[in-house]
Amino acid sequence: MSTPTTTAENPWPVRTVARKIGDWIGRLGEVWIEGQLTQVIARRGTSTAFLTLRDPAADVSLTLTCPMRLLQALEHKPADGDRVVVHGRPSFWAGRGTLSIRVDEIRAVGIGELLARIERLRKLLGAEGLFDPRRKQRLPVLPRRIGLITGRASAAERDVLSNAHARWPQARFEIHNVAVQGPNAVPQISRALSTLDMSEDVDVIVLARGGGSVEDLLPFSDEALCRAVARCRTPVVSAVGHEPDSPLCDQVADLRCSTPTDAGKTIVPDMAEQVRALGILRERARRALAGWVDRERKLLEALRSRPALADPYAGLRRRGEEITGLRMRGRQAILTRLGAERTQQANLRAQLSTLGPAATMARGYAIVGVLGASEQTVLRSVAEVTEGAELRIRLADGALRAVVNEVKKTE
């Protein structure tokens, strides 16, 4: 049977729409639903209890109603934050247009079942690579600002702050107080993570919570929270519970600290140790510089002790003495040559005087020329001898003058 079409000219009245919605919901039948209780209202003197069941991984909730006798018959009374499985039938109350689940059975989720679910989620996240050490980021040596997500006025907050400030008094924090257990923990922690991750000044984020039961720490093993931690670009430190506790966010975070106290000691360096290390480095630098200066001083002294630097004018004096000796030897050679040339000149003059007609005339002789071949021969011989002697005298004079000029130049 087809559903009649409504139009603006032929609309349905409210009662018709409410009745049809009720019919559609009624066809769903009985269902089993799992979730986390966020509100339990069971007033004395009433026959009906009202509960709110929330999906731990999404911001979705349903209203439950159940007979008071059902709650009173349970060994463990349901409370806010409990994980339960309920059986009931959806119903639509047309008078107010609200949907509710009429519950006829409530079962608490046991610890064994919770641990089994956490283990299954652990394997799933591990298979996706969220635990891979290669994707983890290194913490900054000295963060400018530290984001802290923890419970309001909690011991975990005091432990982180006191230990961090004891090690580095100037450490700055941006604190977000959230619910750390119960149904509101996951959405509040996720929003705080997103806010701190978008802050440019925050260099590291710390999730801190004290110890507790498995149920108390369930939010830190929630799949939505683990994926929110994995998406953070800022390094995340997980400091949840005590040493034996190991929620899933410990393995997803970039660093796991066993306790909030350990986190306070890890996220900042120890100022006293840094001062000591700085003193050691300064002393090492001083010794290294002093050693270098000492080596350079010894090298300089060795260079200064070398003859070339100890007496830099010694080489010049030796060269001067060599030049003086060479000048004296040159002068002596020139004078010797000059004496030889003078002696040769004197010999040539003596020969010329002996062969010349003046010497013959001085002895009382005369040279008479006889016409003929023999006369011409005698006269030519005398002229040749005379010309040769004069030539040698001129050459000797020129050489003598040249030697004298050279001696003057050297002097």
Image (cartoon, rainbow, N blue to C red):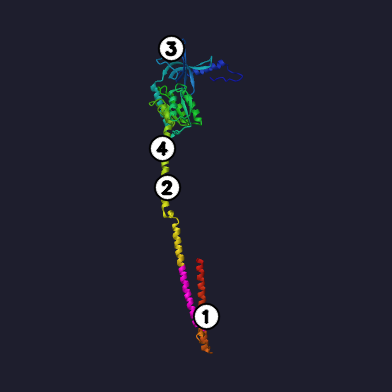
Marks 2 and 1, the one that precedes in the sequence: 2
- Mark-to-mark CA distance, 4 and 2: 25 Å
Marks 4 and 1, the one that precedes in the sequence: 4
As drawn, the label of residue 280 is 4
Residue located 48% across and 72% down the image = 338
Q: Position of residue 401 (x, y in %)?
A: 52, 72
- The residue beneath circle 3 is 69
Q: Position of residue 127 (x, y in %)?
A: 42, 31
Q: Residue furthest bottom?
A: 371
Q: Nearer the viewer, mark 4 or mark 3?
A: 4
Q: Position of residue 175 (x, y in %)?
A: 48, 26
Q: Amino acid at mark 4?
A: Ile
- Mark-to-mark CA distance, 3 and 1: 171 Å
Residue range in magenta is 331-357
Task: Choose top left, top right, bottom left or bottom right for residue 84.
Answer: top left
Looking at the picture, tell me which residue is in the foreground, 267 or 110: 267
- Crowding near pointer 3: few (<14 within 10 Å), some, many (20+)? few
Determine whether the residue tagged by mark 3 lies in a helix, strand or loop: helix
Indicate left or right for 111 with 2 as reference. Answer: left
Our reading of the magenta stretch's main secondary structure is: helix
Residue located 41% across and 37% down the image = 280
